[in-house]
């Protein structure tokens, strides 16, 4: 019997498709934009063994559509689009690409920090208009500034390592991070309020869990310094976008840079599209050639292991208790 994999419309890189072909796996691509109803129809009609997903929602109903479903494999790290509890209840293995995109995501985070704090985008626009504003230009720079990191996982720690050569001071709020993650130079903040009050730049790398929804809102933005900058390339749901737009418009904070939004793409009436001192990119943190290739191949490897009844590497397993229950 042929092994079957459903790949949601946002797809995976060619390296993943090549691996499936080598293993003789039949691949079914859903059509854009992968609504739940379509995924249910395809998973049910083809009785797929695994689903590979980037951003589409994998609900309990999608899982129940195929009695053969053994695994759900996320291309990348975030799991907010997958009902992990429902998968675990059904004995379906969930994997992600934990850590594979950390370097690239941290690179964009720090690029955004430099772009917004050095005011690069307005300068570039002025140069195209023939404006030479050298004498008016003056910024704080990064040396001696306090970088507050929210979420000290793979990405947050790399961002910290990038900040050190610039002479920045570091603090972090990350209640689930092990003590060793803070090292000797990252001050552990007991509350996010404490971090916001002292940070010159706040860089967010927390997961999109329900308890973190609108963690950054009117109240928390008001705690920040009026000279502070806010950076988010974690998850859009963490930010109350109306509150951020207001904070920028009223000068409550100095500026912001975002790579993620809620929803994506932003609707035309989103006030962030007209907010001042804001740099935006279209959720491209991990879109590098190497990451696309690596995450695609690893997703395909994990899918084939699960289908064959083998266990993927522990670092990619989201719900290893599924294997424990079958032993």
Image (tube, grey):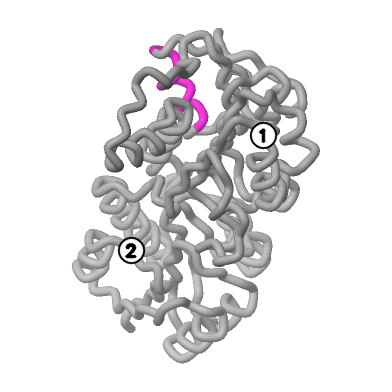
Dot 2: what SS? loop
C-alpha span from label 2 to label 1: 41 Å
Percent from the top left, x then y, of residue 64?
60, 80
**Depth order, front residue of 228/89:** 228
Residue of label 1: 251
**Depth order, front residue of 310/156:** 156
> Does residue 169 lie above or below 108 as drawn?
above
Tally of numbered tags: 2
Residue shown at the point (50%, 63%) measured from the top left: 265
Within-10-Å neighbours for mark 1: few <14, some 14–19, many 20+: some
Quadrant showing the N terminus: bottom left
Dot 1: what SS? loop
Percent from the top left, x then y, of residue 184?
55, 8
Say which of marks 2 and 1 sits in front. Answer: 1
Residue of label 2: 12
Residue shown at the point (35%, 41%) measured from the top left: 125
> Does residue 82 lie above or below 318 as drawn?
below
Percent from the top left, x then y, of residue 290?
25, 46
Q: Is residue 73 visible?
A: yes
- Residue 5, numbered label: none
> Does residue 209 lie above or below 141 as drawn?
below
Q: Residue pushed farthest bottom?
A: 45
**Stretch of the chain drawn in magenta:** 156-165
Q: Which secondary structure dominates the residues rendered in magenta?
A: helix
Q: Earlier in the sequence, mark 2 or mark 1?
A: 2
Residue shown at the point (24%, 49%) measured from the top left: 289
Q: Let me know if residue 158 is in the magenta part.
A: yes
């Amino acid at each position: 019997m042929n092994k079957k994999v459903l790949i949601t419309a946002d797809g995976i890189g060619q390296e993943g498709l090549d691996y499936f072909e080598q293993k003789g796996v039949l691949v079914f691509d859903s059509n854009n934009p992968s609504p739940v109803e379509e995924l249910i129809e395809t998973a049910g009609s083809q009785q797929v063994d695994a689903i590979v997903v980037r951003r589409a929602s994998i609900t309990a109903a999608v899982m129940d559509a195929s009695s053969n479903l053994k695994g759900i494999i996320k291309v990348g790290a975030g799991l907010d689009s997958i009902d992990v509890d429902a998968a675990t209840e059904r004995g379906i293995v969930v994997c992600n690409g934990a850590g594979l995109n950390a370097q690239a995501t941290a690179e964009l985070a720090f690029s955004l920090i430099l772009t917004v704090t050095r005011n690069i985008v307005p300068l570039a626009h002025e140069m195209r208009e023939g404006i030479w504003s050298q004498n008016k230009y003056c910024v704080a720079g990064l040396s001696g500034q306090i970088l507050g990191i929210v979420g000290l996982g793979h990405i947050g720690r790399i961002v910290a390592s990038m900040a050190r050569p610039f002479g920045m001071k570091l603090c972090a709020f990350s209640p689930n991070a092990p003590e060793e993650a803070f090292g000797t130079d990252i001050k552990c903040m007991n509350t996010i309020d404490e971090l916001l009050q002292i940070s010159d730049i706040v860089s967010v790398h927390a997961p999109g869990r329900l308890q973190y929804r609108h963690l950054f809102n009117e109240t928390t933005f008001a705690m920040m310094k009026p000279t502070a900058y806010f950076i988010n390339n974690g998850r859009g749901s963490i930010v109350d976008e109306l509150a951020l737009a207001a904070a920028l418009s009223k000068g409550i904070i100095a500026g912001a840079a975002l790579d993620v939004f809620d929803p994506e793409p932003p609707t035309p009436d989103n006030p962030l599209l007209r907010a001042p001192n804001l740099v935006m990119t279209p959720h491209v943190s991990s879109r590098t050639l190497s990451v696309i290739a690596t995450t695609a191949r690893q997703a395909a490897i994990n899918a084939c292991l699960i289908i064959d009844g083998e266990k993927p590497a522990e670092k990619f397993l989201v719900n290893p208790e599924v294997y424990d229950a079958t032993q």
